[in-house]
Amino acid sequence: MRTVAAFLAARAAAAGSRALRVGGGTTLPGRLALALAPDLVPTLARQLRRGVVLISGTNGKTTTARLLGEIAQAAGLRVVHNRAGANLLSGIAAALLAHTTARGRVRGDLGVFEVDEATLPAALAATGPRLVVLLNLFRDQLDRYGEIDLLADRWRRALGRLPHEAAVVYNADDPLVAEVARAHAGRRVAFGLDAVPDALPPRQAPEHAADSRYCYACGRPYVYTLVTLGHMGHYACPQCGTARPGADVRAVDVRLEGVDGAAFVVHAGSGGGSEHAPTAPGSARLAVRTQLPGLYNVYDATAAAAAAWVLGVDASAIARGLDETAPAFGRGERVVLEGREAVMLLAKNPAGFNEVLRTVLLADGNPVVLVAINDLLADGRDVSWLWDVDFELLADRVHAAIVTGLRGAEMALRLKYAGVPSERITLVHDSALALAAALQRLPDGRRLYILPTYTAMLQLRALLARQGVVRGFWAQ
Amino acid sequence: MDLRICHLYPDLLNLYGDRGNVATLVQRARWRGIQVHVAEARLGDAVDPAAHDLFFIGGGEDRQQRLAAPDLRRVKGDALRAAAADGAVVLAVCGGYQLLGHFYRPAEGPDLEGLGLLDLHTVHPGAGARRLIGNVVVRERTCGVRLVGFENHGGRTYLGPSVRPLGEVLVGFGNNGTDRTEGAVWRRVYGTYLHGPLLPKNPWLADVLIAQALERRYGAVTLPPLSDEEEHRAAEVAAARARAG
């Protein structure tokens, strides 16, 4: 009875806060609801006929959840998912409440929730997922999450408690994620990239931002035959033999199309020598396209395809869902400003920023960039990570760099030491003026690349919304 | 004139943008027409104490420190001690700073024996203890210059009598969060918890290190001043963010 009363109160709070436009109706009512009814999430999640999928990792949670959500909808399922970034338990609670009738019935078939890395253990316990997708573990906000190994330990313990019926879809190319996934005793399905596109220079050593270079079993440096992103790729330990597991779902023939998207082929179930070769529904080969730019999104799309395949979704729905997914806000989103096109590419940690820089340079050899760096809690208070990003890539290529944000001065300094000539760096404190300055420096017929941290992205979007630019483009 | 830098464990102890410190030393020397050579010494690599003027060690997580500690003592220890005794500069940040002390006592598990180059030790007060995290502002001990950075450490470091602190904490925690000291200096060996990284926003300290590193081979060196407008602006913002809490 207590639950029912609490549920009704929470639901009313959710409706109220949406009406008042407080917190967008996401986490505030969720927090209230959890305070009133701690078992709200398990009670509601149990009603989802096709179960719950949880998606976690440092980079790509929001995008992968969107991709899988679109696929599931293309397959005719009613999907319940949390709003981008509302990825704590309160965000999941709010999403479930928003799909619940006054009589406490959840309208929806499948829950697809992105989960904050630190919240994953609690979310596993609360939702009892049928499928968990583990994307990657990169250095991110050490001041908030602590050291990456501690996080991995918590994941390991939580996966050890996961029922055997549940499946874990994990990134074979990330040594730490592959090692952590072994803690699950049930079905494991690995995904990965077979090769990097020809457009990118082949790399055999991880970049500076790489984190997991040393074997998790014995401490020797891994030997890489292929590096895709950061510390991800095809690795093996020369001492103890620990190596990348064969991928059950593989992306091959990847073609990157700058900021316009990517095309590739997904092979599922052709084995790859995994000890846990998937059993159903057999192997498949699927040509896919996505509007989402960069190699990161190829990983995300492959992860979503692997998850959908494990859920038994048919191939045509997978291809349609991937093709139709528009970029999540701030993650490759386009906007037209005074007749000029701008693309916003969220960049919140070294590995992600490096990939964004590569994507930009692939599209434009002499780009104009607007870099907006904040140091609020959601960005990470510590801006040291900017010094791990390979801004040296821009040194003799960037046409103009306009920098802004609470730590714009730090960013300007970073560019100076990266070797960008000072006359190409403009520091503008006010973000509206920074945007205007960037447009002014933009040669005719060229695109502006906006590279913000998380809260800087939210501020810029709010600014664009006030200018009336983003309506229609940004509506989610 | 040339400056020879040895970056120790660049791929192992490279947390928190440590390579920004090396980039700063390199650029500030080059902007003055000084040639720079950067050598890297990884696990297993021996170092020649006479071949380098400045050694840099960055930070790492517990796992990386455990991998580096025995190598630092057995493979590189004698060379570093000899270089320091001969007037070479050593800069160690965060985890590297802890490794230069006598020992590091982790939250659990056995003590990690350090190099003992700096008279200090570090104790982690337990898994439940709060980490010392945040922006830091320090007044440098000898010249009163303001230093800014960011700290993030679980261990508390306590100085022995033969080192002096690098500075006094104005905002933040410093060595242990209680005695207001930050960092440690002995001869030309510098240890600090300020990453952020340390040198780009503290160009005065970067130039002190460059000048001291050159002195061993070239005698007293006066570095021509640089325009540090961007450096001072970024430091000003960092100090303001620190005071804002």
Image (spheres, rainbow, N blue to C red):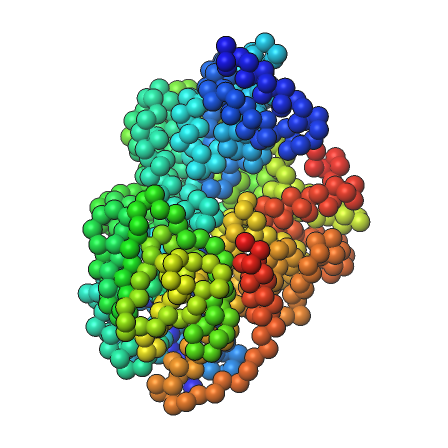
Q: Residue at x 23, y 56 (%)?
A: B112
Most foreground residue, B205 or A138: B205
Q: Is residue B27 left or right of residue B189?
A: right
Residue with the most extreme front position: B179
Instruction: Tell me if B62 is positioned left or right of B225 in this view.
Output: left
* Residue at position x 46%, y 46% in the image: A144
Residue A442 relative to residue B11: left or right: right
Q: Is residue A319 visible?
A: no
Using the image as rendered, state which of residue A260 and residue B176 is in the foreground.
Answer: B176
Image quadrant for the C terminus of chain A? top right
Q: What x and y, as percent, mark residue B138?
A: 47, 67
Residue, x 71% and y 25% (percent of image)? A19
Q: Position of residue A51 (x, y in %)?
A: 47, 18
Q: Taking the image as drawn, is residue B85 in sight?
A: yes
Q: Give the x, y percent position of residue B48.
A: 26, 76
In which quadrant of the rendered view does residue A294 lie?
top right
* Above or below for A371 versus A60: below
Looking at the rendering, which quadrant does residue A208 occupy?
bottom left
Along the line of sight, which residue is nearer the eye, A273 or A413? A413
Q: Position of residue A406 (x, y in %)?
A: 62, 55
